[in-house]
Image (spheres, coloured by chain):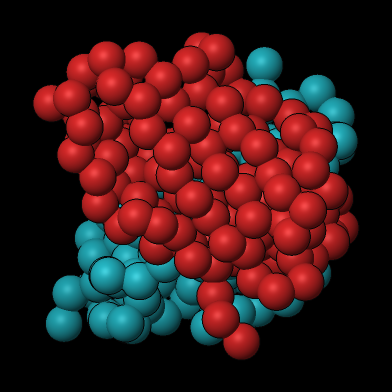
Amino acid sequence: AQRVTQPEKLLSVFKGAPVELKCNYSYSGSPELFWYVQYSRQRLQLLLRHISRESIKGFTADLNKGETSFHLKKPFAQEEDSAMYYCALMDTGGFKTIFGAGTRLFVKA
Amino acid sequence: KAGVTQTPRYLIKTRGQQVTLSCSPISGHRSVSWYQQTPGQGLQFLFEYFSETQRNKGNFPGRFSGRQFSNSRSEMNVSTLELGDSALYLCASSLAPGRGGTEAFFGQGTRLTVV
């Protein structure tokens, strides 16, 4: 079954500390993976996608097919990174996106 | 460029009633997806439309239905409302759907409360 697991509901780090938001997926084919972010009182928006292999706002994510993971990382967290983060998987057909339960990141001053 | 617009923003309905939610995608976007967001279940995929055709549907009962018009605007309908249907319903649109396609842009959602 297709599934996206984000094991942490809440992650709290100090400003300047490294942060890693975990995401594991279950999918029999070749997935297309995303990270979405929702800042307070804002719309859900795309942060990055694995096929782009880019860094957005200092965040990177590497697809590890062996571990079926797509963890989101940032070396130095900022207070403005505090938000809800969702990992998502698009199926082979491309017509359905499955979201994880989300991780709330809180960056303390 | 206007973003994805969902109307109404808030709705209160009683059990057994039906409700229709509307989504206007970004101009030029032809793919529209719907999601249900609840604290317990997170974001659950409802269905996706492209060129007035439903191409995929999530695991929701038949009470949940949708459609897309020729101008790409989409509606979703929930009949015989249940308390458990209380949720934030999100709509997302994209220019080029599918794998490798363009980014999906989300609306602000419609908050449905069933009493």
Residue drawn where x is 59% and y is 56% of the image: B92
Residue drawn where x is 67% and y is 51% of the image: B32
Tally of marks: 0
Q: Is residue B60 above or below residue B98?
A: above
Q: Does the image show residue A33?
A: no
In the rendering, at what x and y percent does residue A58 appear? 54, 82
Residue drawn where x is 27% and y is 15% of the image: B16
Q: Quadrant of residue B113?
A: top left
Colour of chain B as rendered: red
Q: Is residue B100 left or right of residue A41?
A: right
The residue nearer to you, when weighing B39 against B53, is B53
Q: Is residue B101 left or right of residue A15?
A: right
Q: Does the image show residue B61?
A: yes
Q: Is residue A101 above or below residue A105?
A: above
Q: Is residue B25 left or right of residue A36?
A: right
The quarter of the rendered structure image containing the N terminus of chain A is top right
In the rendering, at what x and y percent does residue A12 appear? 23, 60
The quarter of the rendered structure image containing the C terminus of chain A is bottom left
In the rendering, at what x and y percent does residue B110 appear? 35, 51
Q: Which chain is cyan?
A: A
In the rendering, at what x and y percent does residue A56 appear? 60, 79
Q: Is residue A46 left or right of residue B32?
A: left
